[in-house]
Amino acid sequence: MSADDASEQLDRRLIVATQAGLPLVPRPYHALAEQLGVSAGEVMARLNAMLERGTIRRIGAVPNHYAIGYTANGMSVWDVPDERVEELGARIGALDFVTHAYHRPRALPLWPYNLFAMVHGSSREEVLTKVAQIRELLGADCRASDVLFSTQILKKTGLRIAG
């Protein structure tokens, strides 16, 4: 087996071991290392290499918003000028109450929105107040908007591969 094959197999085993989340222990990389029979340094190096290659996009917490009290979750949608959507999206994404913002193509004539931003709150009123802050930030660049409130959690997991 070549070094590349061994690294590829370790990457796969690492993905399988972490696809349901990192171990909830004080030193998760060390726990993974023990499980996989490698060093914690190797686990961190392989994860960094996969991040750099784009094999995995990020390592982060994925909270259950309902469990932490954010029961009113609204996807705000915005119609902004295409030539400014990246800049405006970055500004909205930097707001502490926006968990993710992204650019999507319009589906005219029914769907004029090209910028999406997820806003969480403990009530619909709180979400609408935060959406008003986004509207103020956008100013004249906001040509239309709406808020689509979640009514249930349909999926809260990423891709799963077999071990």
Image (cartoon, rainbow, N blue to C red):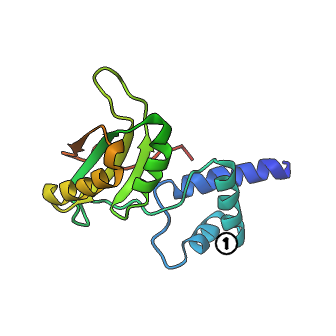
Tell which of 3 and 1 is nearer to you.
3
Q: What SS does tag 1 mark?
A: helix
Which residue is outermost to the top?
Answer: 109
Above/below status of 112 relative to 7: above
Above or below, 82 against 162 in this view is above
* Residue shown at 75% from the left, 53% from the top: 7
Please identify the residue farthest to the bottom as the structure is shown: 26
Q: Position of residue 155 (x, y in %)?
A: 33, 45
Name the residue: 34% across, 21% down. 108
- Count of labels in the image: 1
Badge 1: residue crowd in 10 Å (few <14, some 14–19, many ≥20):
some
Q: Residue 41 at x, y = what percent?
A: 71, 71
Answer left or right for 60 relative to 35: left
Q: Residue at x 53, y 43 (%)?
A: 161
- Outermost residue to the right: 2
Say which of 8 and 153 sits in front.
Answer: 153
Lateral position of residue 6 relative to residue 24, left or right: right
Can I make out residue 131 in this image? yes
Residue type marked 1: Ala
Q: Is residue 39 visible?
A: no
Q: Percent position (x, y) of residue 87?
A: 49, 48
| Residue 48 coordinates in the image, percent (x, y) | 67, 61
Q: Is residue 53 left or right of residue 86?
A: right
Residue for badge 1: 40
Q: Quadrant of residue 29?
A: bottom right
66 vs 34, left or right, is left
